Amino acid sequence: MITYSEQTRVLVAVDCIIFGFDGEQLKILLIKRGFEPAKDQWSLMGGFVEANENLYGAAERILHQLTGLKDLYLEQLKAYGSPERDPIERTISVAYFALIDINKYKTQISDRYHAEWFLINDAPSLIFDHDLMVEEAKKRIRYKAALHPILFELLPKKFTIPQLQNLYEQVYNTKIDNRNFIRKVNSTDLLIKLSDKDKSSSKRGAFYYTLDKNKYKAKFQSFLNFIPNPEHLISM
Amino acid sequence: MITYSEQTRVLVAVDCIIFGFDGEQLKILLIKRGFEPAKDQWSLMGGFVEANENLYGAAERILHQLTGLKDLYLEQLKAYGSPERDPIERTISVAYFALIDINKYKTQISDRYHAEWFLINDAPSLIFDHDLMVEEAKKRIRYKAALHPILFELLPKKFTIPQLQNLYEQVYNTKIDNRNFIRKVNSTDLLIKLSDKDKSSSKRGAFYYTLDKNKYKAKFQSFLNFIPNPEHLISM
DNA sequence: AATAATAATCGTTGATTTGACGTTTAATAT
DNA sequence: ATATTAAACGTCAAATCAACGATTATTATT
């Protein structure tokens, strides 16, 4: 029987960078670690990969544990494997980022992890190399969202154009001309206008829209350009 | 003392998808495995991550072992972790892709690995999930090269415009209008025209060019568009 | 009933880029 | 002299772009 017996085995973990949008602000979900090392420090949600699951499955499980949600947008970011990244024992971590609508998130489930949403630009510093992971995840999202309509994954089923624009403005930390933005959004043909309005943030009220799922899938690969001169903003 | 003792440890490997260009054709470097399992089958070059090195360092080492080359373009593709991907024992593999100028490659070093260059569209099928890795690496290169000038990493120090165009045509498997291509290339201002010519492939001879390294670094992030309608070609 | 505030549409501008295509000139091996 | 490839220059209409002006719609507030 063949074995790889002379090789060292290491721990493999999955860590999740969870981005959320509540209709107003872009946030990230962090947990307060309940165990050593680095107990009581802020951290990404993570866990070890189990014997029978693949990496994506592990990320799904971990995400479900914390949020109670399934079928989220989830994409592998990168594997991190510096020998010193975990002080206790060498651990390779495969980072995944998820995009979720905060309104779907169930608080009660997260209580055991002491999870909290933080504004994307106002989050505490994290354990190990998690800050680096978050930075690289932000870059990746900017990069990808400049070309593909992934930001819709952050929005509720029904959303308004001002919410959508606000989301883009936060992701790219820039002001977007509203007239050009609407024109571009309409030209993608991805949205279906509903008959009811959101009157919470204005007197007139903004029409709700919903994503045309079929067109979304069909057009996912075709490049978008909601952001003027994205090459000035993106680096990765 | 804190430990993660109850967790299972697994093997972590690095596999390299090595793309090369010899001035005429785009190729991939494969090895014939000299050990079990899957002895004598074609495979990507890989190896286990050692105790004192990070993932990128492991990829560099493995690449150096096979090619004798250092300081190559090397980028992490993705981590692969299906439980069944290695029949002997669970192994997570972090795939890296490298871009190299085949002329720099030293044959004698590779002999112990029975390495061979294959045309990109005429390679044998590989062990484990290596075919999947190669497919995803090809996609990644197409995606990235549509936006960033990474294909220059495949070219020799001195190269001609016809060589460059040929390379793009092979990567995207398409014909490119030569007049528009030259105009676009010149407009990037990335190339320095040399005074000597390559007369091997034409009577007139084509001027050699070299990459302006400073401008290359400065402009790496700004999007290129050598490929007409890249959105028709790219998917990832 | 007037006002304020946000939402949404329509239109214009000139600049730039795009791809498709035509033409010409250059250099040199044969 | 000829064939062949390199390369530069030009044209053209279509499309896209960002920036900006103006208007209308809707409704809560006063």
Image (cartoon, coloured by chain):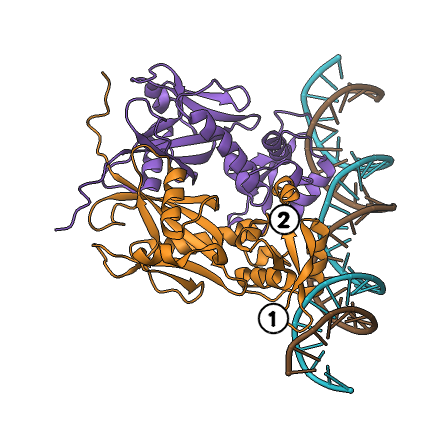
Chain colours: A purple, B orange, C brown, D cyan
Please report, as a chain letter, where disc 1 is located. B
Q: Are marks 2 and 1 in contact (CB under 8 Å)?
A: no
Q: Which mark is residue B164?
A: none
Q: Is residue A134 visible?
A: yes
> B108 and B29: which one is in front?
B108
Which residue does the numbered mark 2 point to in the structure image? Answer: A188
Question: Which x, y percent locates residue B189?
Answer: 71, 49
Q: Position of residue A132 (x, y in %)?
A: 47, 28
Q: Residue furthest left?
A: A1
Q: Provide residue B42's location: percent of width, then percent of height.
A: 31, 60
Residue D17: which quarter of the image? top right
Q: Where does the image place residue A234, in percent across and percent down from the top left?
A: 60, 37
B32 versus A110 height, above or below: below
The three-letter code of the residue at mark 2 reads: Thr
Amino acid type assigned to the residue bearing label 1 in the image: Ser
Chain of the residue under label 2: A
Choose mark 2 or mark 1, whichever is in front.
1
Q: CA distance from mark 2 to mark 1?
A: 46 Å
B112 or B98, which lies in front? B112
- Left or right of A4, for residue C5: right
The number of numbered discs placed on residues in the rendered structure image is 2
Residue B201 has which mark?
1
Label 2: how many Cα within 10 Å (few below 14, some 14–19, many 20+): some
Circle 1 Cα neighbour tier, 10 Å, few/some/many (<14 / 14–19 / ≥20): few
- The secondary element bearing badge 1 is classed as loop
Query: Of residues B70 and A94, which is closer to you in this image?
Result: B70
Please identify the quadrant where the N terminus of chain B is shown: top left
> Is residue B222 visible in this depiction of the protein?
no
Labels 2 and 1 share a subunit:
no
Q: Quadrant of residue A181?
A: top right
Q: Is residue B230 left or right of residue A135?
A: right
